[in-house]
Image: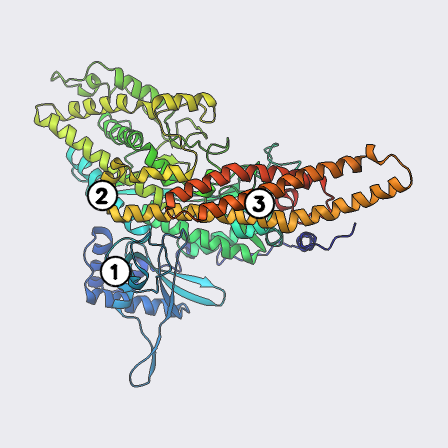
Amino acid sequence: MQSTNFRFKALEKTLDRKPVPVKCPSDKISEYFGQNVFDKETMRRVLSADIYKALIMAIDKGAKIESHVADAVASAMKSWAISKGVTHYTHWFQPLTGATAEKHDSFFEPDVQGRHMEKFKGSALVQQEPDASSFPSGGLRNTFEARGYTAWDPTSPAFIMENGSGKTLCIPTIFVSYTGEALDYKTPLLKAMAFVDQAATDVCKSYFDEGVTQVKASLGIEQEYFLVDRALYRARPDLVLSGRTVFGHSSAKGQQLEDHYFGSIPTRVHNFMVDLEVESHKLGIPIRTRHNEVAPRQFECAPMFEEINLAVDHNQLLMDLMEKVAERHDLKVLLHEKPFAGINGSGKHNNWSLVTSTGKNLLSPSFKPEDKLQFLTFFINTIKAVHEHNGLLRASIASAGNDHRLGANEAPPAIVSVFIGSQLTKVLDDMENNASVEHNGDDNMFMQLGIDKIPPILLDNTDRNRTSPFAFTGNKFEFRAVGSSANSASSVTVLNTIMADQLNKFKKEVDALIANGDKKEVAIVNVLRRYIKESKDIRFEGNGYSEEWEKEAARRGLSNITNTAEALDEYLTDKSKNLFVSNNIYTEAELEARLEIMWEHYIMKVQIESRVMGDLALNHIIPATLRYQNELISALSDMKSLGLDYENTVGFQTVNEITHHLNIVKAKVHEMIEARKAANKVEDNRERAIMYKDIKEGFFDEIRYHVDKLEFLVDDAVWPLAKYRELLF
């Protein structure tokens, strides 16, 4: 049968695809790395010594930026940008939509005498008022009071974004309401960073190193993604509208041979990766790693570690770059957590650690007994913090997309646990069971406390457990449950906050023991020893996918909420409210507003998927299937008119099977539509989110099952949607 459907036109386009050549600016990355960034080296070159010193004080110490400093920086930034061909500037921010936002203004400005010139004042650098009424606020603003303000974040350097024939100076900013409430991801992240800096610095200065003046949380974000041909992507309305395939029979070959993982990178994809890396390096994003991931058409890139605020900004920028670079190569990047059923989904592994102003990684084991005690202090307090707030960490990575991935035997389970490996497990067990927790005045204090006998813990000498959501991997904790499309600020804001809160509690307890006469090291070990016992339930070394672990986790009292609608409740528990409000990360109003936005975002995502399902089923799948079925019926009718035994033919059986699946698809789609109408009448966002969760669980899989059966029964030449074998291979 000859077909003219869109799928086959898309397939024809893929036959002529050739790898797009990429020319690097130089053979050495170092010669163009950061060339489009207004970084410290550039600022040192273009600013006066006094202005540069004042700006660095603002960046490193949080000092106030005076107006004359802002004017000088703005003037230098404008001159630098114009010299590189920039015509416009924008405040670049991260509203609660999950994407970045920008409004471009030209440097060009006529003055009162009618002369034309390029202007950029310090006031424009420091603050702007975008037309921000349509950004989600969770009820913090009325439409008639919709002003939102962007304010310069000098700790994240300005950069030049090249887009087609234009260049724009992008200035990273926070985004707040007229009355000061945070309307973005960056504002609470900066507060949480300052909080963990204060808490960790206090612990370091008091007990380990008086020379420590600052502790910065660092982050390395590994980014997984899929790449498919752009023409085939456009032949899948579900991919275009929802980011994932709501239907699709599995390909005969998937990932079962494990031949894609770390395999040879296809030339076309390799050229995309090189192009992406060039654009990233020009923007100062330190990408170092690229490789094939487990699933076909799935890949990963990873940067070096950076201070958290910059790492998050760079990851958001990287996702935007991926989209633009992929277009040049006639590819489409898919950042949805589960774009294809039956094969692995995508996440972003957040590798988190704490680094002092003296250059020491507080989560890096050491050979010296006193350094081992410092390492154990921060290591055990991290485990304790995760134990105390495991439900909140789960909520921080909740999304409609991540629900498809978590716990699916391919990603960490929805149960948050900590994996530390056999060697460190033995260390904590020995420390817990060490009876000698007092010091009798002899020289070998650390031996008496059980610290000296701990064996040297070598870097990256820990085991690997891919089923663990939160694993220690040598000198950092890897939070592996974050979704591939997520803004990492959400999860690391929570992580920094719970860690800082825990360190403050730890210091208070240790100081109380010291005031009571205990020697410092004895007090520290006694508190840590108790923490090991209290947080033991969060540690798990086994298979996180097993049913046994689900039962064991329930016995331990660990949270296991598999859907976003209910997981988000953790944000509004008294415990979480107190954590955020008392530590000035969120006000209660900000917290409630964010929860409303997250519920609404979940509702919209599921609603779109449901509507796409209905549209594809009723307007694409059923008509195409009926056309094919009518052809079979016509052939059977001819057989009957000739007196042949048509009832025992494959055609007759196929007609009956098709009828069975079609009837169920149509009935279930209409039931789903009615359920959606009922949900849409409910005003309370949480209640509506629960109803949409029930729609997702009650209809999606069943409708998909029968549509996928039809794909297997209907003639390939008339099936309207690009198939998995075409998209993936």
For this orientation, the residue located farthest to the bottom is 113
Q: Circle 3: is it few (<14), some (14-19), or many (20+) Cα within 10 Å?
A: some
Which residue is identified by label 2?
581
Residue 347, image x and y in percent? 46, 40
437 versus 263 height, above or below? above
Please report whichever mark, 2 or 1, sits nearer to the chain's N-terminal start: 1
Q: Are marks 3 and 1 in contact (CB under 8 Å)?
A: no
Please report whichever mark, 2 or 3, sits nearer to the chain's N-terminal start: 2
Which residue is identified by label 1?
178
Mark 3 or 1, closer to the camera: 3
Give me the disc on residue 670. Answer: 3
Residue 271, image x and y in percent? 56, 52
Which three-letter amino acid code belongs to the residue tagged 3?
Answer: His
Which three-letter amino acid code belongs to the residue tagged 1?
Answer: Tyr
Which three-letter amino acid code belongs to the residue tagged 2?
Answer: Val
Q: Circle 2: is it few (<14), some (14-19), or many (20+) Cα within 10 Å?
A: some
Judge whether residue 505 can be spotted in this image. Answer: yes
Instruction: Give me the C-alpha separation between circle 2 and circle 3.
Output: 45 Å
Secondary structure of the residue carrying tag 2 is helix
